[in-house]
Image (cartoon, grey):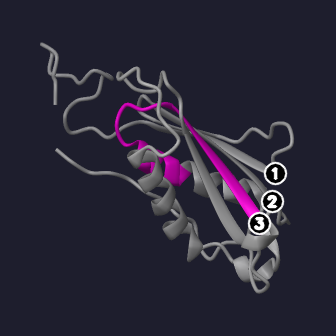
Amino acid sequence: MVLSVSGLREDGRRPTEIRRFKCDFKSSGNHDGSATVHMGLTTVSATVQGPREVTRYKEAKHDRAIIRFKVIMAPFSTMERKKRRHGDRKVTALVSLLEETFSGVVQTQLYQNSQIDVTISVLAADGGYTSACINAASLALLDAGVPMLDIVAACSVGF
Protein backbone atom coordinates (compact mmCIF):
# COMPACT_ATOMS: atom_id res chain seq x y z
CA MET A 1 0.00 0.00 0.00
CA VAL A 2 1.48 3.32 -1.08
CA LEU A 3 0.70 6.31 1.15
CA SER A 4 1.34 9.96 0.45
CA VAL A 5 3.13 12.27 2.85
CA SER A 6 -0.23 13.20 4.39
CA GLY A 7 -1.04 9.51 5.02
CA LEU A 8 -3.62 9.08 2.22
CA ARG A 9 -3.85 6.49 -0.54
CA GLU A 10 -3.74 7.43 -4.23
CA ASP A 11 -7.53 7.76 -4.38
CA GLY A 12 -7.70 10.05 -1.32
CA ARG A 13 -8.76 7.45 1.26
CA ARG A 14 -7.18 6.90 4.63
CA PRO A 15 -5.77 3.40 5.19
CA THR A 16 -8.81 2.37 7.27
CA GLU A 17 -11.51 3.75 4.93
CA ILE A 18 -13.46 1.70 2.38
CA ARG A 19 -13.89 2.59 -1.27
CA ARG A 20 -16.80 4.82 -2.25
CA PHE A 21 -19.63 2.90 -3.91
CA LYS A 22 -21.92 4.32 -6.58
CA CYS A 23 -24.19 2.59 -9.08
CA ASP A 24 -26.15 3.85 -12.07
CA PHE A 25 -28.98 2.20 -14.00
CA LYS A 26 -29.22 3.43 -17.57
CA SER A 27 -31.08 1.49 -20.21
CA SER A 28 -29.37 1.74 -23.54
CA GLY A 29 -30.07 0.37 -26.98
CA ASN A 30 -31.22 -3.20 -27.24
CA HIS A 31 -30.35 -4.28 -23.70
CA ASP A 32 -32.97 -5.48 -21.25
CA GLY A 33 -30.99 -4.30 -18.24
CA SER A 34 -27.78 -2.47 -17.47
CA ALA A 35 -25.82 -1.16 -14.52
CA THR A 36 -22.58 0.71 -13.99
CA VAL A 37 -20.74 0.26 -10.69
CA HIS A 38 -18.08 2.61 -9.37
CA MET A 39 -16.07 1.25 -6.44
CA GLY A 40 -13.40 3.81 -5.67
CA LEU A 41 -11.51 4.32 -8.93
CA THR A 42 -12.73 1.00 -10.37
CA THR A 43 -15.53 1.28 -12.93
CA VAL A 44 -17.43 -1.71 -14.34
CA SER A 45 -20.42 -1.69 -16.67
CA ALA A 46 -22.75 -4.68 -17.19
CA THR A 47 -25.54 -5.27 -19.68
CA VAL A 48 -28.10 -8.07 -19.85
CA GLN A 49 -29.96 -9.40 -22.87
CA GLY A 50 -32.68 -11.93 -22.30
CA PRO A 51 -34.19 -14.21 -21.41
CA ARG A 52 -34.50 -14.84 -25.12
CA GLU A 53 -34.51 -17.75 -27.55
CA VAL A 54 -31.31 -19.78 -27.67
CA THR A 55 -29.03 -18.87 -30.58
CA ARG A 56 -26.93 -22.08 -30.47
CA TYR A 57 -29.36 -24.95 -30.35
CA LYS A 58 -26.66 -27.47 -29.37
CA GLU A 59 -26.24 -25.62 -26.06
CA ALA A 60 -29.98 -25.40 -25.34
CA LYS A 61 -31.34 -27.00 -22.18
CA HIS A 62 -34.91 -28.26 -22.39
CA ASP A 63 -35.56 -27.79 -18.66
CA ARG A 64 -33.85 -24.45 -17.95
CA ALA A 65 -32.19 -21.36 -19.39
CA ILE A 66 -28.46 -21.03 -19.88
CA ILE A 67 -26.54 -18.02 -18.62
CA ARG A 68 -23.58 -16.78 -20.63
CA PHE A 69 -21.05 -14.31 -19.31
CA LYS A 70 -18.61 -12.30 -21.39
CA VAL A 71 -15.97 -10.12 -19.74
CA ILE A 72 -14.19 -7.40 -21.69
CA MET A 73 -11.15 -5.77 -20.10
CA ALA A 74 -10.56 -2.43 -21.79
CA PRO A 75 -6.90 -2.03 -22.79
CA PHE A 76 -6.78 1.28 -20.91
CA SER A 77 -8.36 -0.14 -17.73
CA THR A 78 -5.09 -1.00 -15.98
CA MET A 79 -1.63 0.47 -15.74
CA GLU A 80 -0.40 -2.45 -17.87
CA ARG A 81 -1.12 -1.27 -21.40
CA LYS A 82 -1.27 -4.71 -22.92
CA LYS A 83 -3.97 -6.07 -25.14
CA ARG A 84 -5.70 -9.04 -23.55
CA ARG A 85 -6.00 -12.15 -25.67
CA HIS A 86 -9.25 -14.08 -25.98
CA GLY A 87 -8.07 -16.87 -23.67
CA ASP A 88 -6.54 -14.65 -20.98
CA ARG A 89 -6.31 -16.53 -17.65
CA LYS A 90 -7.67 -13.71 -15.50
CA VAL A 91 -10.67 -13.19 -17.75
CA THR A 92 -11.35 -16.93 -18.07
CA ALA A 93 -11.19 -17.38 -14.29
CA LEU A 94 -13.49 -14.41 -13.77
CA VAL A 95 -16.04 -15.76 -16.27
CA SER A 96 -16.09 -19.18 -14.55
CA LEU A 97 -16.44 -17.48 -11.14
CA LEU A 98 -19.41 -15.45 -12.41
CA GLU A 99 -21.07 -18.51 -13.97
CA GLU A 100 -20.60 -20.49 -10.77
CA THR A 101 -21.88 -17.64 -8.60
CA PHE A 102 -25.02 -16.86 -10.56
CA SER A 103 -25.99 -20.39 -11.64
CA GLY A 104 -27.42 -21.10 -8.20
CA VAL A 105 -29.14 -17.73 -7.78
CA VAL A 106 -30.90 -17.06 -11.09
CA GLN A 107 -34.14 -19.02 -11.44
CA THR A 108 -33.30 -20.59 -14.78
CA GLN A 109 -36.01 -23.24 -14.51
CA LEU A 110 -38.63 -20.59 -15.31
CA TYR A 111 -37.27 -20.15 -18.84
CA GLN A 112 -36.88 -23.42 -20.74
CA ASN A 113 -34.89 -23.36 -24.01
CA SER A 114 -33.75 -19.79 -23.33
CA GLN A 115 -30.51 -17.93 -22.78
CA ILE A 116 -29.47 -14.92 -20.74
CA ASP A 117 -26.40 -13.03 -21.95
CA VAL A 118 -24.47 -10.88 -19.47
CA THR A 119 -21.68 -8.70 -20.90
CA ILE A 120 -19.35 -7.03 -18.43
CA SER A 121 -16.93 -4.29 -19.43
CA VAL A 122 -14.14 -3.35 -17.04
CA LEU A 123 -13.48 0.30 -17.83
CA ALA A 124 -11.08 1.11 -14.99
CA ALA A 125 -9.43 -1.48 -12.74
CA ASP A 126 -7.88 0.05 -9.64
CA GLY A 127 -8.31 -2.94 -7.37
CA GLY A 128 -11.36 -4.94 -6.41
CA TYR A 129 -12.63 -5.34 -9.97
CA THR A 130 -13.80 -8.91 -9.31
CA SER A 131 -16.18 -7.63 -6.65
CA ALA A 132 -17.26 -4.79 -8.91
CA CYS A 133 -18.02 -7.28 -11.72
CA ILE A 134 -20.18 -9.41 -9.44
CA ASN A 135 -22.05 -6.36 -8.12
CA ALA A 136 -22.58 -4.93 -11.63
CA ALA A 137 -23.86 -8.27 -12.96
CA SER A 138 -26.26 -8.64 -10.04
CA LEU A 139 -27.65 -5.13 -10.48
CA ALA A 140 -27.98 -5.51 -14.26
CA LEU A 141 -29.90 -8.78 -13.81
CA LEU A 142 -32.20 -7.00 -11.36
CA ASP A 143 -32.68 -4.13 -13.82
CA ALA A 144 -33.60 -6.63 -16.55
CA GLY A 145 -36.23 -8.20 -14.29
CA VAL A 146 -34.60 -11.64 -14.27
CA PRO A 147 -35.99 -13.58 -11.28
CA MET A 148 -33.35 -14.43 -8.70
CA LEU A 149 -33.56 -16.14 -5.33
CA ASP A 150 -31.54 -13.35 -3.73
CA ILE A 151 -29.33 -10.40 -4.58
CA VAL A 152 -25.63 -11.19 -4.89
CA ALA A 153 -23.20 -8.68 -3.37
CA ALA A 154 -19.44 -8.91 -3.16
CA CYS A 155 -16.54 -7.09 -1.54
CA SER A 156 -12.84 -7.72 -1.15
CA VAL A 157 -10.99 -7.21 2.11
CA GLY A 158 -7.30 -6.84 2.67
CA PHE A 159 -4.85 -4.70 4.52
> Residue at the front extreme?
58
Q: Which residue is mark 3?
A: 115
Q: Which residue is mark 1?
A: 32
What residue do we see at 81% from left, 77% from top?
Answer: 111
What residue do we see at 32% from left, 41% from top?
Answer: 18
Mark pair 2, 1: CA separation: 7 Å
Q: Tell me the quarter of the picture where residue 121 sits.
A: top right
119 in relation to 82, above or below:
below
Nearer to us: label 3 or label 2 = 3
Task: Give the structural element (helix, strand or loop) at label 3.
Answer: strand
The quadrant of the rendering that contains the N terminus is top left
139 lies left or right of 128: right
25 lies left or right of 19: right
What residue do we see at 81% from left, 80% from top?
Answer: 112
- Does the magenta segment cover residue 129? yes
135 in relation to 16, above or below:
below
Q: Crowding near pointer 1: few (<14 within 10 Å), some, many (20+)?
A: some
Q: Crowding near pointer 2: few (<14 within 10 Å), some, many (20+)?
A: many
Nearer to us: label 2 or label 1 = 2
Q: Which residues are magenta?
A: 115-135
Disc ID at residue 50: 2
